[in-house]
Image (cartoon, rainbow, N blue to C red):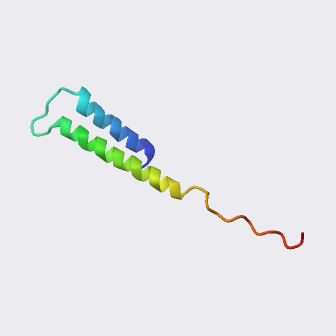
Amino acid sequence: MGIGTSILLIAIGAILKFAVTASVSGVSLSTVGVILMIVGALGLLISVIMGGYWTRRGYPPPPADPLV
């Protein structure tokens, strides 16, 4: 799950939690919204942490030229 997907899940969850007043029998849309926001936040956190492993830091400098 990427950062964009995580933000989308958070947004959909917030809409279901705070903006939708309709009711569906057998399903609490507010609870579904909270679950989507939690899953989106966890996905965002994991994406940011895993993205840190793919950066180019910590590599040693190239070896010096022995002919100079």
For the C terminus, the image quarter is: bottom right
**Taking 31 as reference, is 61 left or right?**
right
Q: Is residue 49 above or below residue 18?
A: below
Where does residue 2 sit, x and y in percent of width and height?
44, 48
The residue positioned 44% from the left and 42% from the top of the image is: 4
Q: Residue at x 9, y 36 (%)?
A: 25
Residue drawn at (47%, 56%), measured in percent from left and top?
A: 50
Toward the viewer: 65 or 4?
Answer: 65
Question: In this rendering, would 51 be left or right of 5?
Answer: right
Residue 26: percent from left, percent from top: 10, 39
Vertical arrangement, residue 19 with respect to residue 67, above or below: above
Among all residues in the image, which is located at the extreme right? 68
Left or right of 61: which side holds 6? left
Name the spot of residue 14 as percent of width and height, x first: 29, 34
Of 44 and 64, nearer the camera is 64
Instruction: Where is residue 3? Give x, y as percent.
Output: 44, 45
The mark tally for this picture is: 0
Query: In terms of image quadrants, where is residue 8?
Result: top left
Query: Quarter-wise, where is residue 32 in the image?
Result: top left
